[in-house]
Amino acid sequence: MAKSLFKRLLWTYLSILVVAIVVLSLALTFIHRGYAFNEKKRMLENAAYDISGQLASWTDGGISQNELNRTVDSAGYITDSKIYVLRLEKEALANIESLNISGDLDEKYLFDDLRRIIDGETVFRRNQNSEKFGTRVVFLGVPWRQKDNISGAILMFSPVNEINRNAAKMNYVIWATAIGFILLGGFIILMTSKKISSPIKEMEIAARKLSEGEDSEDIHANTDDEIGRLAETFNSMKKQLAETEKIRNSFIASVSHDLRTPLTSINGFVDGILDGVIKAEDYTKYFSIIKSETSRLNRLTSDILQTAKIQSGKLELERHEMPALELLKSLAENMKALIDEKSISIEIECGEDEIVNADADRLYQVLENIVGNSIKFTGRGGRIFIKAESTQNGTVFSVRDTGEGIPEGDLDRIFEKFYRADESRNAANGGSGLGLNIAKTLVELHGGSIRAVSSAGDGAEIIFDIPR
């Protein structure tokens, strides 16, 4: 049987609710029953003390025997009890056989209680079985005191039936209320469990559809908590995956075209040479084109392989200190052919004592990708400014050009993998769309960060830092 978060939440919380309410109801039942017996004891004690006072008046001649009997009967009626007043001497209890008391009081437990009462104790039994009364009774025995002496005992017997009836009524109220709370709490738990589990179930279904290549609707949690934020994150991830898939498909189509175009050219020129269509005196011209196309293929495959290597996590840096100016001069010299082709000038601003701690090959690759990008999108006679300066935390590099600039809407995305700000422009310039992403990844491997500042038509500036 498949486990369901909804069922687990429902049964877990429902079990806790039922156990808590049942335990509370049982506790209230026992507390109320104990309270009822304590109230009965208090009532009997008050009546016993009143009778004790009347007995004192009777012995002093203040009231008659009939008045005393009426007082005792009245107390018995009010307390729902049968009351006995016994005159006993302590010596009479020494021989139980010779003790002559009412047959109603011929109880096995009573004689021991009488000894305790004559000794001055108050005896209370809350649920005593009485064979003579034929029921369970509440029994209270208090000493009959005359001045400083104990002359006997006041015994009170009250059936527990009335207490049980009242307790049963209260128990009915307690348990009816408990069932009501369980039903109400169960409904609330049911709705809450459904509210919590439904968005997660929707996300599960949506994730399964995404894994199978299907589209799915956005998740609507309608809550301002972790579930709601999870749904928002899932929706954002879904949109990002869709966008990434779109960019990936566009990239694959673009790369396929970029690979096919030079291969078609190379194949056509080679066939022309082999078939004799191209004359020998034109070989140099067409071999130069073939070499150019081969270099283009090499750059494209190099970018793809570099990206794959970075993704696999196999790229390790070999950092050491080096003069930044020497690296920048080497870069400018190696890119001289591209610069001269478009009559672009490069200006380097860097102190001779500027030292950077980095992997030389990877830092060179970062600068080469950024500067190469600037060369592509800077018109003839343009200028490129490369600057390196020390900060408290390391070295900051910037590459600024006077080219076309980057549209504001593309600034946040130009470092994304498979993203091209302008498909037609990139296609015309033969770019793979991976250069800036590789540069960003290599900078971050050094522990730095990279950003772009630009506006369309005003050139662009790429700034990155290499921490010590």
Image: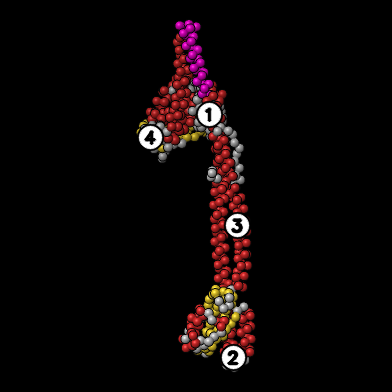
Q: Nearer the viewer, mark 2 or mark 4?
A: 2
Q: Which residue is mark 3?
A: 182
| Magenta range | 254-281
N-terminal-most mark, 1 or 4: 1
Q: Which residue is mark 1?
A: 248
- Identity of the residue drawn at 48% across and 31% down: 437
Amino acid type indicated by mark 2: Trp
N-terminal-most mark, 4 or 3: 3
Image coordinates of residue 411 in percent, x first then y, are 54, 33
Q: Dividing the image into 4 quarters, which one contains the N terminus?
A: top right
Amino acid type indicated by mark 4: Asn
Residue 300: say if magenta: no
Instruction: Check residue 357 in the rendering and tell me which mark sits there, or answer none.
Output: 4
Q: Dividing the image into 4 quarters, which one contains the C terminus?
A: top left
- Identity of the residue drawn at 63% across and 89% down: 67
Please name the predominant secondary structure of the magenta segment in the image: helix
Query: Is 418 left or right of 187, judged from the image as shown?
Result: left
Q: Nearer the viewer, mark 3 or mark 1?
A: 3
N-terminal-most mark, 3 or 2: 2
Q: Which residue is mark 2?
A: 58
Amino acid type indicated by mark 3: Ile
Q: Nearer the viewer, mark 3 or mark 2?
A: 2
Q: Say if mark 1 contacts mark 4, CB within 8 Å.
A: no
Q: Secondary structure at mark 2?
A: helix
Q: Residues within 10 Å of mark 3 (few under 14, many from 20)?
A: many
